[in-house]
Image: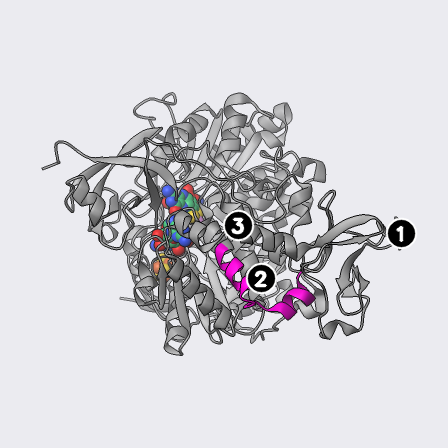
Amino acid sequence: MSEQQVPSYCAQCISRCGCLVTVKDGVLTKVQNLAGHPTGDVVCVKGKAAPQIVYHPDRLLMPMQRTQPKGSDNPGWQPISWQQALGTIADKLGQFRSQSGAKSVCWGITTPSATAIADSFIWINRLAHAFGSPNKLFATENCNWHKDFSHAYVFGQGIGMPDYKNTDCILLWGFNPKETWPAHALQVTEAQKRGAKLIVIDPRKAGLAEKSDLWMGITPGTDGALAMALANLLIANKQYDQSFVRRWSNGPLLVRDDNGSLLTAEDLGQCGANDPEQLVAWDERAQAIVLYDVKSCEYQSDSIEDPLFALDDRIELNGISCRPAFSHYRDACQRYTLEYAQSVTGISAEQIEQMASMIGESKAVSYFSWTGTAQHQQATQTTLAIASLYGLTGCLDKRGGNVYFSKPPVNNLMGFSLLSSELRKEALGADKPLGPWKMGWVNSNDLHRSVIHKAPYKTRALIAFGGNPIATKPNEAFVRETLRELEFYVHADLFMNESAKEADIVLPVSSSWERSGLTPGFLVSQQAESLLQLRKPVIEPLGEAKSDTSIVFELAGQLGLGEHFWEGEIDAALEEVLAPTGVSLSELKAQPAGIDLGLKTHYRKYRNQGFNTHSGKLELYSECLLKSGYSPVPQFPEIQAPSDYPLILTSAKFRAHCHSQHKNIGMLNRRADAPLVEISRALAQELSISANQTIIIETPIGRMTAIARLNADLAKNVLCAQYGWQESGKNYNGIIEQTQSDPISGSNRLKSQWCRIRKLETQPG
Ligand SMILES: Nc1nc2c(c(=O)[nH]1)N[C@H]1C(S)=C(S)[C@@H](COP(=O)(O)OP(=O)(O)OC[C@H]3O[C@@H](n4cnc5c(=O)[nH]c(N)nc54)[C@H](O)[C@@H]3O)O[C@H]1N2
Ligand SMILES: Nc1nc2c(c(=O)[nH]1)N[C@H]1C(S)=C(S)[C@@H](COP(=O)(O)OP(=O)(O)OC[C@H]3O[C@@H](n4cnc5c(=O)[nH]c(N)nc54)[C@H](O)[C@@H]3O)O[C@H]1N2
Ligand code: SF4
Ligand SMILES: [Mo]
């Protein structure tokens, strides 16, 4: 008998936990944590369940094609060879490309945060681009867009990572790492042991909220109002970092009253149209303007260490009335009085004041926010409000704040440059001025419009690498209609899911344990970011399963795109990814536990390079949003709940499952075969609902059943249900209205759907 223990990492979710894998006679038997690895302190139950996932009898083991028409009860799957499968796919794609243009083919990608698709993410994007299509169906609008991209309107880049080793006060804002990112949660707990304070903003007192210093039980979807009220208090009490705001934010830059644009030196006749762009601030002490050069990010003044820039007053220059950008932001915040914020968020004025003082009194504040704030109709404005509030603390990229740790320098080979700029502008969704479509990330609403209404053109095929939009995008029926109407749908996966059942061809994908993967940096600390690790396959692929990367490289060859794919040599491609690190693939292969690049953190990099925004400053006022037709400061139009749906339904993730996955895995599904829904004791009492009874949740578009769990801490008008059950009637996203979406990101009310509930008359026995 041969037994091996291989140092590796679990690739099944964003936590990418360092692990030790036991393989006996070629069989994966055990996954345990790998002490000493920067994310190796724990593996979760899904990691431990890896053998059950890998050897599950439902694994797809060979390519199959449909023989019965779509909509039939039984698709009549017939096994086919890889050669037949890839040949058919290449022929069909070639046909669509020549008849309707490559953009008529959309490429689907499951989420890298809850699957191992990160192994292949760049290659799938690259294939779409090399093929000539800008369109990729992805989860970003409900997932990482807000933390990684809408934050950039304020910061010039994403949210960063809390510098847990040095922080004094942590905000977990709509993020529950205890269930969703254990390596992250451990850092929080360590920081708490050191004395850092923890504030959790979550409708549920869940996860680390139990051990927090302050739990803010917010009404779902109202985080923007809380952020604005907190900012209002910090400004009123002068508890914000005034020197940072004056020196490094665009707060002092003057805004024209007539059109909202930033005042330029050219407006004042101080330079010509062809001179480099210069903006204008007002020096209170000198009672004079100071010009700001956008390109160099420098003010033309020596006295800036002693900040004198005006933040408040309206002045008239050259007949143009204007006032500092900061005053616009401050005015927007002033609408959020304690009374108003209390009425909107359901949080007491005392608690809001307490949170503001904790932020104001802490030297180094850090925060992380993810899907709790991102799955709402006003998700973009919400993240702008939170990012702007954070901007006031002056902690961005400061020791103990949210920091951009140094990362292994790898080549980004997603291949956007393979697409012409004209084609990039034809991505579905490009009728909106901004949003994920700019990266070619298409949402299910825009895809539906294209497939069903041919607007602005018809999408004919979808080639999906994992994902289950029927269970994870809003309005199951709407998504099913899209998939069914496609002329050709290919789905590559480990398992047959509800969406894959609509496919014409299904391809078997190997699990992460059967293939290799590269992780350049493990995110949660500088030490973790310094690690470069190549995961090697620990077992042979099951059946005929292939990795997504192999499928991409082989398909590229068949499509005549081999030149963009190193003529099928995956190792050569990986060498190119690694080139800037100076580490070769063979060196990395020889070190299965990874190579520590010993990278060092550089704080406050903006001092040398400015922020990556248009003005080069942290933007509390966004001219970019204004020019695209949106409010330049966070703004929340009041949206009225329909009177017959008085409750608010939110959702959350839990440790044992990722989205629609893992419901079939015995050791991950001990508790229930139906979604659970947390409801408040008060509401349960009013409706005579007891724990474990089945209730019906209704929205304007449908109903689902769920099993009640009573929660004494939940507000009476809030429910939190599990999602990801695929069966109609249990599918949470079957009852979410796709019509109400964020105007910029396209996010949906997956966490703030109006609903009503009742008890199921006849309870299952
Ligand atoms: N076990 C497991 N881990 C996962 C995943 C998984 O499916 N399962 N998925 C991965 C992926 S793709 C992602 S994006 C991450 C996401 O990770 P998280 O963002 O942590 O995921 P959620 O649990 O959906 O949401 C976080 C918290 O937001 C709260 N919440 C709900 N509504 C609101 C609201 O309106 N405001 C506020 N402030 N909070 C609210 C919920 O109660 C929940 O506790 O997790 C990753 N890790
Ligand atoms: N109501 C509600 N809906 C939500 C959310 C929520 O909080 N509430 N969260 C949203 C979020 S954050 C996200 S990211 C989306 C996720 O949405 P999806 O990306 O649709 O995620 P899953 O349901 O996990 O589907 C993953 C599928 O990919 C397969 N898979 C796993 N690993 C691989 C692999 O390596 N290769 C291939 N080819 N396939 C693989 C799995 O077997 C599974 O069938 O869901 C969103 N939907
Ligand atoms: S949290 Fe669990 S599933 Fe995710 S990487 Fe760690 S062990 Fe794997
Ligand atoms: Mo996600």
Residue range corresponding to the magenta coloring:
229-249
Of 406 and 100, nearer the camera is: 406
Q: Residue at x 64, y 65 (%)?
A: 245
Q: Residue 206 in magenta? A: no
Residue where numbered disc 3 is placed: 335
Binning the other alpha carbons within 10 Å of mark 2 as few (below 14), some (14 to 19) or many (20 upward) gives: many
Q: Amino acid at mark 2?
A: Gly
Q: Which mark is residue 391?
A: 2
Mark 1 and mark 2 lie on one chain; the one further toward the N terminus is 1
Of 483 and 198, nearer the camera is: 198
Q: Is residue 366 above or below residue 480?
A: below
Q: Decide if residue 704 is in sight here.
A: yes
Relative placement, left or right, of 662 versus 119 is left
Q: Which mark is residue 269?
A: 1
Relative placement, left or right, of 561 versus 178 is right
Q: Residue at x 45, y 43 (%)?
A: 376
**Which of labels 1 and 3 is toward the front?**
3
